[in-house]
Amino acid sequence: MKLIVTKTKQKDNYISYTPIFFFVTSFLILFLGTKSSPYYIYNNWCDANSYFSVGKAMFNGLAPYKDIFDQKGMYLYFLYGLCYLVSHTTFIGVFIMELIIGFIDIWGLFKILKTHLSESLSLFLAPISFAIIVSSYSFYMGGSAEEFCLPLYIWGLYLILDYCKKVSSDNKYVMPNKILITGGVLAGLVANIKFTGLGFFFGWMAYIFFIIVLVQKQLVKALQSCLWFLLGMFIPFIPWIIYFDLKCDLYWWYWGYVDINVFSYSNLGADGPGIFERIYNLAKIALWTLQDNPVWFILLIIGVGYSIFRLRVKSYERLLIVVLLGFLFLGIYIGGSRLPYYALPLSVFNVIGLLPMGLGLEKIIKKITNPSWISSSVSIVLSAIISITVMYTLSMNIPDHNLKKEDHYLTKFTEIIKESRIENPTLLNINCLDAGLYTTADIIPNCQWFQTQTINSNIPYNAQDRYISDGLTDFVIASKYYPVHIEDNYKLVSELPWSQEGYDIVYYLFQKK
């Protein structure tokens, strides 16, 4: 059966088959790529479990930042809270959320590809582009804040590519206010998930502003466009302004999300490196990112080259990808911190690198055969096969499928907590972020510093020392070494060596005497 048979049937087939194809490929790719999926026994990544614990606490009446601390944005915790409602002790809800996000990602990648390629070839390449993202080291174990932001970047990229294409064909084309508001909403959502990614949307709106001013010579219209964008950006803030105003105080939102991230988690203060040292550090980060993620990074370079040097385009179109990519990179890394998953937003530009390859493939197909074959179910199956092959070949998570549930520290520690028969047990996580035991044992954190943070402050360490001295929780899970004075109030009930990503550690479980 043809996916697209004739122009008269194109719309019907598009509606009937394309969403199914995108959902199926999203499932296949994420089933292998994220440790939230049933293919793996646990997603024991500390960051994802931390978000789950905060979302769970939020849906049980605690206020993020004030009652339970983590430094990401509110929409991330809200979405994880919804996942908690699906399952209290597993990540199946997170997997479902990732499937929905993946579906939106693939659809957006398809729309981007379709700005330059035929619909049939765009359908073929969109899942492959998504597989390249998910299989990369920057995707990590699945469930990151960056992953939840991916559809916002992808659809933002599509909107501005579509805008530039229309301006190129009609110099007087004006971006509708509803699109400007939509772009602002996307930016506002990013701001309330992980604001370091806002550099993309700063470049997005700045580019539109300068096109209106320099190409269309309409300064007033450019300023109006910025106001529409800012209006859209403000909309996602409204629910959390109301929430914190009613729940506790807006100060806690500012302190936990802005103040801590800017002044305690980055080196943007006066004592940070100078401008030349920052430039040197950014260059090193770019090199490390290439080493960690060679596939999408090389495609990114190809995409930048294609955007700059392609023929028969307006001069202002050539720098679009450079501007978006540059501001996004600066926003993520200017603070000096670097972790593998920070680079994930940059991976969306791999789709631009696929454009010249797609154009070349279209020319080859037209020369050797009837191009209608690419619209057939055969090409769709081929796209799925290539995507799965990419996952099995490149994903860092595939080897973890071989872990046995009975050998996992989470299984052993969860059984001990259940066998204690303590009603509504409490837990403290020491010397690392959330190790996953809050999730598997269905425990709601009962203290603000429920896990050891990596911020430049002694506040969490002093607070956790006090929790242990006061015997505030029934259990303590620690990694690497014993907490100070732990044996005054707690006894060791289990320990298990663990190896992950080349690091050997030991997890200890203590129970209050």
Image: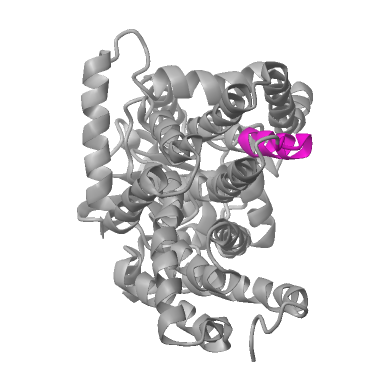
Write the residue at 66% across / 37% down: 183
Q: Position of residue 344 (x, y in %)?
A: 42, 48
**Can residue 426 be seen?**
no
Give me the residue at 65% from left, 33% from top. Answer: 188
- Magenta highlight: main SS: helix
Is 511 contained in the magenta span?
Answer: no
Which residue: 40% across, 33% down? 326
Residue 219 in the image: state x and y as whole percent.
67, 17
Residue 271, located in which quarter of the rendered image?
top left
Q: Horizontal placement of 290 versus 265: left or right?
A: left
The vertical placement of 385 against 446, above or below, is: below
Q: Nearer the viewer, residue 355 or 400?
A: 355
Q: Quadrant of the N terminus?
A: bottom right
Which of 33 and 85 lies nearest the eye of the viewer?
33
**Residue 397 percent coordinates (x, y):** 35, 65
- Residue stretch rendered in magenta on the structure: 173-188
Where residue 127 appears, as percent x and y from the top left, is 50, 68
Q: Quadrant of residue 168?
A: top right
Point 38% across, 64% down: residue = 357
The one nearer the camera, 349 or 262, is 349
Residue furthest to the front? 312
Q: Is residue 191 left or right of residue 381?
A: right
Q: How is the image coloured?
A: one colour
- In the image, 71 versus 310, the foreground residue is 310
Against 267, is 197 above or below?
below
The residue lying furthest to the top in this view is 270
Residue 38 visible? The answer is: yes
Quarter of the image containing the C terminus? top left
Please determine whether, in this image, residue 10 is positioned above or below residue 280.
Answer: below
In this view, 45 is above or below 462: below
Left-right relation of 55 to 10: left
